[in-house]
Amino acid sequence: MDIFDRLKQATPAEWTSYVDHAFVRQMGAGTLPQQAFRTYLVQDYLFLIQFARAYALAVYKSRTLADMRAAQAGLSAILDVEMDLHVRLCGRWGLQPGQIEAAPEHQATIAYTRFVLDCGMSGDLLDLHVALAPCVVGYAEIGRRLAPAGTAALGDHPYRDWIGEYAGDAYQEIAAMARRHLDDLAARAMTERRFSELAALFAKASLLEADFWQMALDDRPLTGPAGSPS
Ligand SMILES: Cc1ncc(C[n+]2csc(CCO)c2C)c(N)n1
């Protein structure tokens, strides 16, 4: 069993709350309200900007070129691949990248991204990659689950672009590489005494992923300046 499966098995409730969230199920069934998906996508763009910083931090925290290259691959997957999906989908609603960037960050976005950045700042490279793992590997699992018969079978599914992106071979390979790298890093840097601390980080990141889906489902207007209702 690799380190990823060990972390997942140590935190089953948190993992399930993330990968089997109502947002995911509604997206798979095609019943997710478009407004929830829009809220998600705009916040996810802001999320990716912060995650790009987290991968840049992983370059900084690397002591070997191989670790640097693994972090660089994550950074480039965000900047060169994943954000294109967001720009393309938001563009269909007439939203330009500058407008998405100018949107206020939701608390759930701030909570998750700054948690991961802090794991990296206060911990070592293994802490940082464990905090990043639910995001990278979870989306591969969700993609596969929502396209059990492959991406070609998605037909005119309303969320086929999103599902196709994460279920597709290119993304599945990115996630498999991230998983192998995590396993290699753990073999070099983990002691058994550290495992429960790492599992706690993994559990927290999974819960913050679940909160992120929930934020989009709730889709409450953001709190305005002082004096407005909270
Ligand atoms: C809330 C949220 N969680 C995970 C991802 C997926 N993701 C974020 S960074 C990254 C690595 C390289 O692309 C991946 C797959 C997302 N977009 N939004």
Image (spheres, grey):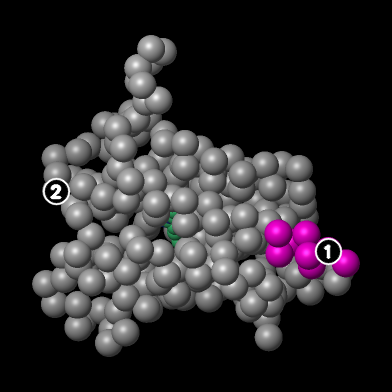
Left or right, 203 with reference to 191: left
Segment tinted magenta in the rendering:
193-200
Determine crowd level at label 2: few under 14, some 14-19, many 20+ residues with C-alpha closer than 10 A: few
Left or right, 93 with reference to 82: left
x then y, percent, for residue 152:
21, 81
x then y, percent, for residue 61:
72, 49
Q: Nearer the viewer, residue 228 or 100?
A: 228
Whether 51 is among the magenta residues is: no
Which of the two discs, 1 and 2, labels the residue nearer the N terminus? Answer: 2
Extreme residue toward the top, this view: 227
Extreme residue toward the left, this view: 156
Question: Looking at the picture, which amino acid does disc 2 mark?
Answer: Arg
Q: What number is the disc on residue 92?
A: 2
Query: What secondary structure is found at the residue carrying circle 1?
Result: helix
Left or right, 28 with reference to 80: left
* Residue that mark 1 sits on: 194
- Location of the N terminus by quadrant is bottom right
x then y, percent, for residue 168:
34, 75
